[in-house]
Amino acid sequence: MTHTFEVTGMTCEACEYKIQHLFSGVEGVKSVIVDKTTNTATVVMEKNIPLKKFQELVKPYPKYGVNEKIATTTLIEKEVPKTWFETYRPLLLIFSFITGVSIIKAFHSNIFETEHFSWMHFMNNFMAGFFIVFSFFKFLNLKAFAESYAMYDLLAMKVPAYGFVYPFIELGLGLAYLTAFQPAFTNWATAIIMGFSSIGVIQSVVDKKKIRCACLGTVFNLPMSTVTIIEDLLMVGMAILMIII
């Protein structure tokens, strides 16, 4: 069953993510699609949930309003969920490009040496590309990213300003790897920052929270899942391995 509600007060993507986050937390809600251009929230639910329930959710946020002016109810015969590949296609493409360039660069870095491939060069290049590219997507809408990030990161929940600072930290780490600045410090910083970040991600996945992953900012609608955990822990693992080597 799906209900379409009118939601007033939405002015940006951050508002859409806020409403989606609030509505998704209601028991019995399967999915939520929010569109600020039409001021609507389409909620797919397992059973009928009264409008009053959603109105109570936005009471702490006076700028928003939910009403039944254009509320409609229809029956859904069958949902057609996206495949795993369709869902994570943007992330897979980005990882493939970064990996490919890192491999080429690792070979090129050793063109005059006896060794034809350097894992150290590969990991260093991969992490530089990872942080720079991922920070770029976050900078496209810094405010929306900070709002989404605060939904699951432990520090951003308590200190919202950290969500605005985090993309700068990622960019700084990317440039540090790119320029080989203080490798030991850079690797330890990466292990600590990404390790801490993964705690909130793991907690969200274990609790089965229906929220978006902000790893690529808010450009792509990627759900929080084990893929996000692997992404964070991969960076931690690489940083630790580079420290050991």
Image (cartoon, rainbow, N blue to C red):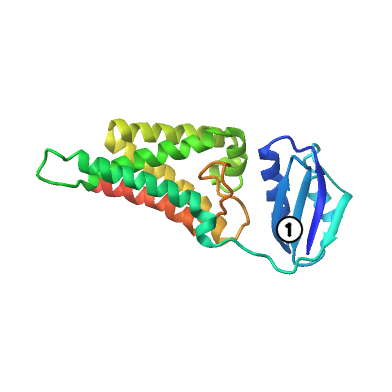
Which image quarter: residue 76?
A: bottom right
What residue type is disc 1 on? Val
> Which secondary structure lies at badge 1?
loop
In this view, which residue lies farthest toward the right?
Answer: 69
Please indicate, yes or no, whether residue 225 appears anywhere in the rendered image. no
Residue receiving disc 1: 26
Q: Residue at x 86, y 53 (%)?
A: 71
Nearest the viewer among 224 and 36 is 36
In-image side of 206 versus 115 (left or right): right
Residue 236 point in image, percent of width and height: 37, 49
Report x, y in % for residue 65.
Answer: 83, 42
Task: Determine which quarter of the picture holds residue 185.
Answer: top left
Answer with left or right where residue 36 lies relative to residue 129. Answer: right
Q: Return the residue found at the far bottom.
A: 77
* Residue 226 position (above or below residue 78): above
Left or right of 7 in this view: 228: left
Up/down of 212 relative to 84, above or below: above
